[in-house]
Image (tube, rainbow, N blue to C red):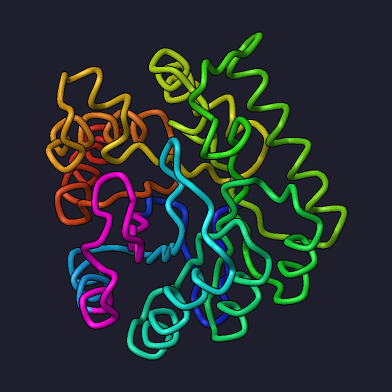
Amino acid sequence: MDLIICKDYTLDLSKPLVMGILNVTPDSFSDGGQFLNVDAAIAHAEQMVRDGAHIIDVGGESTRPGAEHVSVNEELRRVVPVVTELVKRLRVPISIDTMKPEVADACLSLGAHILNDVTGLRNDFMVEVAVRYNVPVIIMHMLGEPRTMQSNPEYKDVVKDVKMYLKKQADHAQAAGINQIIIDPGVGFGKTVEHNVQLIKSIQSFKSLGYPVLMGVSRKTFVGKLTHVDDASDRLSGTIAAVTVCVLNGANILRVHDVKECVRAIKVAEALRHG
């Protein structure tokens, strides 16, 4: 699949694309509280687009390890004003990052273009929402739920297990009528450092399923552990290294916080890959 159709926008996957992260949360692991104000959130999204982001991914509930659930009403209060403005102001697709069908429904009705579900469409109501709005869907693998996912995660074979799960969920989505699917192995979502390394090394194996692959490695804990950096906001160099390897291994979409720096790294990686 070389093109993803997002209503009025078409994403060309012949080159890696960058998804800019916009967390409108008080407790996300690296930028919680920075963009709770609607004006600050919009300004940051606009800057990410100027820096080269092809997609803006809006999330109103933290999915960091140990995160607690927020109510539907609270998540709607956070994301609806932001999505409303971004759809009008930006000239790139808006993705809604949520586990709640009610939030997905509200944001897609406002004009959001992509559904990003970290629970991988486990909820049949989420599937119904995606079908109703006929939008591309990102299906991610997560072991358990954010609150408990890092409690001693175990797999028989992490690549085979994650790949089998993504295939099952993608097959289910297709059978329901979802035609545009992106898969995400879920780096950091119920995985050890070694699990994450294996997933990044195995991007081509995931691509053999026939779907574009999104990788979210930005500022993740495994980057911090490999570089001995506890402060998530100080993990840019490690993030760039991980993003570069993902590109060289064939990732289609990179979900990142530091758009400008990662866009530049991706350009170099692509030149070296094809040069």
Q: Is 223 left or right of 152, judged from the image as shown? A: left
Q: Position of residue 199 (x, y in %)?
A: 48, 23
- Tell me the residue at 28%/30% (across/down): 242
**Front-most of residues 93 and 84:** 84
Q: Residue furthest right?
A: 175
Q: Residue furthest bottom?
A: 88
Residue 39 figure quarter: bottom left
Where 70 sits versus 239, above or below?
below
Q: Position of residue 13 (x, y in %)?
A: 47, 54
Q: Is 67 left or right of 261, judged from the image as shown? A: right
Residue 223 part of the magenta-drawn span: no
Where 164 sits versus 236, above or below?
above
Q: Position of residue 243 (x, y in %)?
A: 29, 36
- Tell me the residue at 59%/19% (across/down): 159
Q: Is 54 left or right of 47, judged from the image as shown? A: right
Residue 155 figure quarter: top right
Where 205 sits versus 119, above or below?
above
- Tell me the residue at 26%/38% (across/down): 219
Q: Position of residue 92 (x, y in %)?
A: 39, 75
Q: Quadrant of the C terminus?
A: top left
Residue span colored magenta: 18-42
Q: Is 274 left or right of 103, judged from the image as shown? A: left
Q: Residue furthest top?
A: 156
**Front-most of residues 212 and 240:** 240
Give the total of numbered labels: 0
